[in-house]
Image (tube, rainbow, N blue to C red):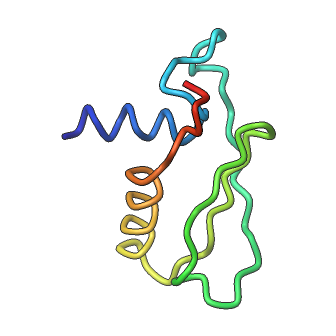
Amino acid sequence: MHGLISVLSSAFLTGTVRIPGEGMDNYIITIVDPVEENPDQAFPKIYTCTKSLYLPRYTDKHILKERLLYAIENFRDNGLA
């Protein structure tokens, strides 16, 4: 399962199941703190064009883990792979 999550998280962050041509070492993601009225109900969003991860300020690490895993596991590549 760990390997699957690794592949899915790479796909979530890059928009494709393939490793970018320049590799992952230089693939830098900016974490953005979106203003959310109720952050514990929001999900992380990735914008691959700008390499920005919008990650709400959750009230605890368990909610962060739950929301992030849900976003990763339910990511759809929209045919970009």
Give left or right: position of 19 versus 36. Answer: left
**Residue 3: horizontal and vertical position, in percent?**
26, 32
**Residue 39: horizontal and vertical position, in percent?**
60, 82
Give left or right: position of 71 versus 14. Answer: left
Q: Is residue 68 above or below residue 66?
A: above
Res 69 → quadrant: bottom left
Q: Is residue 15 above or below residue 54?
A: above
Q: Is residue 2 above or below residue 71?
A: above
Res 64 → quadrant: bottom left
**Residue 46: horizontal and vertical position, in percent?**
65, 50
Query: What residue lies at 53% left-to-right and 83% top-to-bottom?
Result: 41
Give left or right: position of 79 versus 68. Answer: right
Of the 4 image quadrants, the one containing the N terminus is top left
Query: What residue lies at 74% left-to-right and 71% top-to-bottom?
Result: 34
**Residue 80: horizontal and vertical position, in percent?**
61, 28
Q: Nearer the viewer, residue 76 or 55?
A: 76
Query: What residue lies at 23% left-to-right and 39% top-to-bottom?
Result: 2
